[in-house]
């Protein structure tokens, strides 16, 4: 909502009033709704950046606005404020704030209110901790994606730019010259008032918190850099979050498609973006949350206060919406996470199992080509995730047979765990060798550092009984169960890891001996083929650090959320469907209203066509937010419009079913709902091992083998004395007891 433009005059006696206020004279203040209030609209008061902040001042009833004065420290800034529509509020931008604290004082008749702003440099940090080193600036080609110029300093700063683009249906966004003739291929859009205007966009870019940011919005009537044209803005802000898996050390490659979204810009939305919110660059979501706060601060300060801010983005872009809505309640008012997970940090738990299990399967097939594990769909019994016999396998010369572990996740265990494997554009040989390229190093400000210099790791599989559910269900023999768990092993300590082989280092593929798609060179293997392979234990303190940090999604959700995904299990896509329900389970366990989250699935034609339900989600979110604005005291659940309900859609986007019972039978024992029956939901290796659907047990509480047998953990299998001894040999410290909480040590 923009102010009306009527300015407030400074009082001639304001200096005297200010002196009295600074001397601590107490003024009477009416309670409740009659109180004078001052708030920061652009950011939390304690996290202002860039030297300016947009403030809202609510004036008590009966106070003449001419008697209001505003001070930043000892500086009178009253002239920077105007009256908002409605007449009871003032709005203005206070600029020139020094680094550190500034006390804002508002005087209104006999009323006084103060607020302390804490300002940080635009290069950061605010709360994310020490800046990462090595940190490499964007290459020329990546800067060109945002049409940005030269690097100015060691923080990779670039000069802020504003340009104008027009949209062509044939050629997308093109440079627009306001002084030139109207391009013949310029598209038009229809605004909310029914008027038709040219599709011209104002595009601001620059650097904030060392990352490249972008702000875009319609600018149909005026194209001046100094004064934004807000006539086409629908007063809604979209924060565009982007996915991928990165381990930091790079400023980033901005994506045009994420910065400039024609379907949203043409509907009047403003779109904000930063490479600091692209998980393909880094996965330090403390730093990412800080960056998002700073970018939104820039938008609100420079352009105005949106009616609401809604997030959108897939995969890691969805994760960010869940995590940031939990960590920073003022950042987002609504969320549209697409094919998301609850968080990234707990995905490492089961993803780290994939290659350990695939190596066992492949060893069995190598011993006996007619092994049951040559039937790829059998692998789901242990891995939990989908596997199919008819999809070509690029690691087997295109022969049919593939799993999600391979198709979706191969290469990500070394990327997250191996300090030698990662890299970044423009890195020198010295920087490459001297940097630990792991997820844990990327977020070392959270995980902490070991005495030997490596970041602490959370990965742990001590006591994990792979394939336990398959054993209990009669789908895995005791012999296979024992062989699997003796063989599987774990991952070496970071200090003992070596560089990867083929296919990850392409130059090595000329040597057949270097073929190692499982990364077995970095596994803890059996020394003789009979001695059980050692398991991996997390570094002390790492699990507690991450579970108590903002990297872990605890399930706090207080905003309208539509969790949407295409159903891509038939394609073995990494964005598996169980993750929506893992998220909901965490919300339920946290005691948050699970009705704040709506789950939508849309079917696909595998490898051919995927209908995108995102614009429908925006329509429904807008209805949801309109209800909350109309009825301010209403809960998020009570404000849900009719279409904000669990649903599933066919491959053309047509509704199959909508209702509270759509997904029954996944998180409860009720009969399967209509959507549950239509869309099979798979699991993970840790769920098959007995773990919870929430997927957040890094290290399990242990029980002795004898206790597990006595409790009937193995179903109908009653281990013989020899089998019991083998279990104890494989699990010398005990097996997982998932009925107890996971351990933090």
Image (spheres, rainbow, N blue to C red):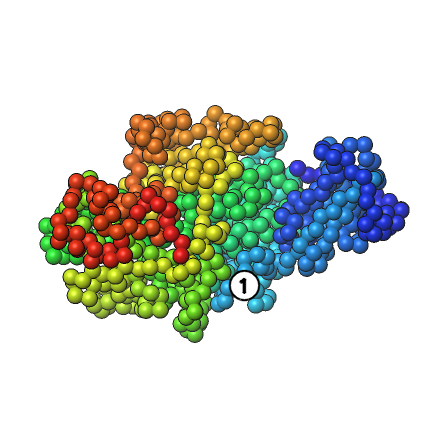
Measuring from the top left, give residue 2's x and y in whole percent: 68, 39
Sort mark 1 into few (<14), some (14-19) or many (20+) by Cα contacts within 10 Å: few
Residue 725 drawn at (x, y percent): 17, 55
Position of the N terminus, as image quadrant, is top right
- Per the image, the residue denoted by label 1 is 130
Front-most of residues 194 and 600:
600
Query: Visible in this render: residue 605?
Result: no
Q: Whole-percent x and y of residue 205?
A: 58, 54
508 vs 614, left or right, is left
For image coordinates 48% across by 25% down, the residue present is 642
Say if residue 537 shows up in the picture. Answer: yes
Q: Is residue 668 above or below residue 241?
A: above
* Residue visible at 77% across and 48% down in the picture: 105
Q: Report the side of 121 relative to 589 (left or right).
A: right
Q: Nearer the viewer, residue 176 or 664?
A: 664
Q: Does 391 appear above or below 122?
A: above
Q: Can you tell which quarter of the image residue 566 is in?
A: top left
Quadrant where the C terminus lies?
bottom left
- Identify the residue at image location x=53%, y=47%: 327
Image coordinates of residue 86 in percent, x first then y, are: 73, 32
Exactly how many numbered labels are in the figure?
1
Q: Quadrant of residue 193?
A: top right
Q: Is residue 500 left or right of residue 209?
A: left
Q: Is residue 33 above or below residue 168?
A: above
Q: Quadrant of residue 309?
A: top right
Q: Residue at x 48, y 37 (%)?
A: 592
Pick whichever, 336 or 670, lies toward us.
670
Local SS, label 1: loop
């Amino acid at each position: 909502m923009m102010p009306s433009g009527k300015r407030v005059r400074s009082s001639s006696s304001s200096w005297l009033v200010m002196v009295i206020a600074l001397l601590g004279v107490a003024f009477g203040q009416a309670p409740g709704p009659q109180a004078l209030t001052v708030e920061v609209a652009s950011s939390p008061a304690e996290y202002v950046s860039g030297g300016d902040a947009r403030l809202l001042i609510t004036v008590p009833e009966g106070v003449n606005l001419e008697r209001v004065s505003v001070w930043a420290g000892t500086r009178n800034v009253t002239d920077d404020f105007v009256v908002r529509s409605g007449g009871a509020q003032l709005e203005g931008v206070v600029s020139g704030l020094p680094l550190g604290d500034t006390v804002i004082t508002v005087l209104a008749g006999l009323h006084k209110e103060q607020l302390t702003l804490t300002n940080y440099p635009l290069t950061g940090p605010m709360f994310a901790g020490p800046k990462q080193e090595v940190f490499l600036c964007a290459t020329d080609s990546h800067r060109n994606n945002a049409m940005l110029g030269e690097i100015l300093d060691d923080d990779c700063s670039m000069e802020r730019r504003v340009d104008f683009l027009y949209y062509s249906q044939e050629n997308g966004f093109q440079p627009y010259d306001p002084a030139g003739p109207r391009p013949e291929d310029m598209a038009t859009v229809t605004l909310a008032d029914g008027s038709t205007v040219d599709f011209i966009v104002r595009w601001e870019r620059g650097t904030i918190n060392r990352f490249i940011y972008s702000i875009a919005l319609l600018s149909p009537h005026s194209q001046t850099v100094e004064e934004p044209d807000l006539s086409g803005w629908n007063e809604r802000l979209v924060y565009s979050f982007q996915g991928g898996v990165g381990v930091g050390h790079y400023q980033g490659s901005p994506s045009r498609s994420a910065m400039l979204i024609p379907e949203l810009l043409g509907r009047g939305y403003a779109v904000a973006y930063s490479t600091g919110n692209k998980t393909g660059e880094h996965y330090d979501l403390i730093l990412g949350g800080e960056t998002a706060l700073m970018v939104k601060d820039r938008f609100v300060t420079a352009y105005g206060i949106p009616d609401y801010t809604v997030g959108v983005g897939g995969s890691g872009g969805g994760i960010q919406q869940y995590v940031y809505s939990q960590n920073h309640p003022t950042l987002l008012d609504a969320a549209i996470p697409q094919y998301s997970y609850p968080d990234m940090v707990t995905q490492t738990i089961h993803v780290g199992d994939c290659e350990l299990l695939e190596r066992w399967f492949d060893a069995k097939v190598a011993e006996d080509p007619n092994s049951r594990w040559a039937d790829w769909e059998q692998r789901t019994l242990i891995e939990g995730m989908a596997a199919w016999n008819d999809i070509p396998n690029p690691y087997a010369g295109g022969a049919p047979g593939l799993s999600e572990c391979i198709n979706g996740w191969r290469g990500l265990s070394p990327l997250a765990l191996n300090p030698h494997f990662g890299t970044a554009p423009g890195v020198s040989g010295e920087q490459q060798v001297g940097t630990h390229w792991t997820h844990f190093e990327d977020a070392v400000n959270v995980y902490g550092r070991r005495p030997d210099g490596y970041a602490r790791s959370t990965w742990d599989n001590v006591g994990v009984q792979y394939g336990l559910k398959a054993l209990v269900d009669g789908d895995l023999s005791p012999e296979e169960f024992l062989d699997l768990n003796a063989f599987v092993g774990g991952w070496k300590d970071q200090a003992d890891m070596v560089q990867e082989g083929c296919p990850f280092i392409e130059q090595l593929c000329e040597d057949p001996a270097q073929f190692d798609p499982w990364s077995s060179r970095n596994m803890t293997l059996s020394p003789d083929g009979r001695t059980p392979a050692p398991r991996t234990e997390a570094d002390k303190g790492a699990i507690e650090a991450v579970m108590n940090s903002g990297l872990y999604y605890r399930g706090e959700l207080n905003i309208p959320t539509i969790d949407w995904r295409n159903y891509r299990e038939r394609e073995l896509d990494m964005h598996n469907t169980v993750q929506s329900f893992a998220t909901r389970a965490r919300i339920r366990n946290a005691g948050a209203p699970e009705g704040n989250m709506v789950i939508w699935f849309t079917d696909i034609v595998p490898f051919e066509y995927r209908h995108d339900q995102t614009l429908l989600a925006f329509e429904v979110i807008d209805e949801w937010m309109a209800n909350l604005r109309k009825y301010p005291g209403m809960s998020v659940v009570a404000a849900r419009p009719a279409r904000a309900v669990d649903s599933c859609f066919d491959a053309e986007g047509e509704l199959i079913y909508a209702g509270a019972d759509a997904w029954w039978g996944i998180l409860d024992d009720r009969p399967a709902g209509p959507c549950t029956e239509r869309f099979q939901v798979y699991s993970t290796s840790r769920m098959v091992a007995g773990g919870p659907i929430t997927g957040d047990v890094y290290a399990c509480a242990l029980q002795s083998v004898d206790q597990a047998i006595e409790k009937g953990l193995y179903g109908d299998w009653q281990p013989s004395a020899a089998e019991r001894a083998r279990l104890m040999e494989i699990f010398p410290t005990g097996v997982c007891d998932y009925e107890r909480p996971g351990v933090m040590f």
